[in-house]
Each structure stands twice: as structure tokens, then as C-alpha cells.
Image: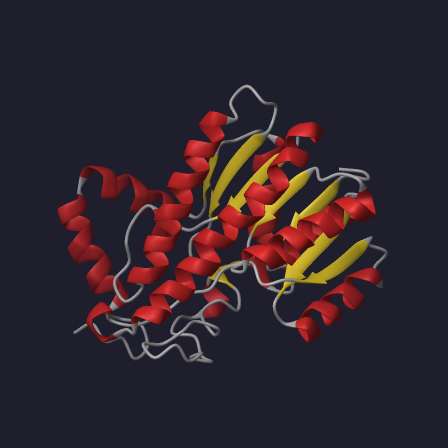
Amino acid sequence: MNNKVIIITGGSSGIGKALAEQYGQLGAQIVITGRNKQKLQETTTELKKTGISIVGIPCDSSIEDETRWMVKTVVDQFGKIDLLINNAGISMRSMFEEVQMDVLKKVMDINFWGTVYTTHAALPYLKESKGGIIGISSIAGFRGLPVRSGYSASKFAMNGFLEALRTELLHSGVHVLIACPGFTASNIRNASLNSSGNITGETMREENKMMSAEEVAKKIIHAYQQKKKTLVMTFQGKLTVFLNKWMNGFMDTLVYNSLKKERNSPLK
């Protein structure tokens, strides 16, 4: 990856930050984006101190004009794009009947449309470099999760979009990887939205028992090097995808019973 130019949306924390660090250590030139300018600057400064070549560009992935400006800025500065990692994402936690519609729209705008906008803007340059696209999706893109209806819908949409795009690009030299972590220790649950669109500020799961963001990043980088098309992580995640395909009625009960054990779950 020496001197390869990599854009990582939502790169200030979690999996995005771990990918920035590990790809940076491999010699890539890293561009991270994010909505929080202060967090973006802190991460950029922290990784620069380790010798990584990194630039932070404030950008809200859900806004098309900002996204196209960000991609143009990268090309103007570096002259190319070799890899786009669509990592920016947000979650929600609410029963569907209680959630405000603008919460679902916000989740879809960031998770799905953010991926679409960035990919569309970067695609001509990725075809020139015969580079790649990685979408950080979720097990929720294969199996809908209760209390996370909007998040699940956005990840199903993301998976379908990237699969269709991968097929369109079959003979272009551009590789597309859909990476689906299971529950990963990150900030996404703390930053998830409730039914009114407010940030919950707390996690409902035991973060210390989950796969770390660093471990997830390592697996994603290896899968991309191996030109895998889909990466499903954790035994639980692989089992969930398999059983849901063949025993979806049983999985309804299993998933319900599992998620109702979460802290303050509305499931009874």
C-alpha cells in the first residue's frame, strides 16, 4: 500500500480510525473525514505523531455537495484515489412504532446515501487507478434486528447497492468488498439515536467482550488483500447469516430473545 491514496469516511474513531492507523503503517497516504472537526483534528494529530501521512477533511457524508467537494479536494491534492472505505455510520435504538420518521431518514442518509454519494464521486478516479471500494456494513445487513429497524434497513440497502455495483464493475479492475463485523467494541452504540433523535450516550452491551476495532481492521485489510467479495466476522455473525437463510422462523425467536437481554431493552 506504499503511497496509495486511501479515503476513509468516518475515520475519527472506531473501525475507521483503526483502519487509518493500520493502512498508514503500511505506507499509504490517508485521508479521513468526519462531521466533528475537533475529533477529526485530534485523530489526525495523534496519528501524525506516529509517522503516518494523514489529512483530515471535515465532511458530512449525508450531504452530497460536501462529499463531492471532499473528493475533489483529495484529487486536487494527491492526483488520484486508490481505495475508498465507506465507513461513516450511525445507529439507532427504538421500537419502530415509537420512532420519529426523521430519525430513520437521518440513519438512511448517513449509512446508505453517504455511501452512494462518496462512491459516485470517487468512482471515475478509482477506475483510473483500478483501485477498490470497501463498504463497512453489518450483520444487520443480512438479518434485521429488532429495535434497530432503521439501522438494519440502511445496511440491507448498502449491501444491495455494493453487490450491484460490484457486478457492474466486474471487468473494470475495481474490486469491491462488503465487510460485515458482528458486534464490535466501538463508539457506535454510545452515539446511537433514540426515538426522538437524541444521542443515547450509553451502550446497552458489554463492550469488553466484543471484537476490538483493531482486530476488525486487521481482518478487513487481509480480506481486501485476498480480493474477497464478502467478509462476515465472528462465529456468532457467521452462524446468524447461515441460520437466517435456512431457518428464519427459528431466528426470529432466537434474535428476539437475545436482544431483549440488552440493558433497558423495550422487548419483553
Q: Position of residue 175 (x, y in %)?
A: 57, 30
Whether residue 236 appears in this view of the structure is no
Quadrant assignment, res 45:
bottom right
Quadrant assignment, res 11:
bottom right
Is 29 displayed left or right of 170 in the figure? right
Is 71 displayed left or right of 245 in the figure? right
User: What's the image's color scheme?
Assistant: secondary structure
Residue nearest the observer in this picture, 228 or 9:
9
Is 53 displayed left or right of 158 in the figure? right
Residue nearest the observer in this picture, 60 or 189:
60
| Vertical placement of residue 246 versus 168, above or below | below
Residue nearest the observer in this picture, 196 or 241:
196
- Residue at horizontal 18 percent and vertical 45 percent from the top: 248
Q: Residue furthest top?
A: 171
Is 88 displayed left or right of 158 in the figure? right
| Vertical placement of residue 246 versus 40, above or below | above
- Residue at horizontal 35 percent and vertical 47 percent from the top: 156
Q: Position of residue 208 (x, y in %)?
A: 50, 68
Task: Assign the N terminus to one quadrant of the image.
Answer: top right
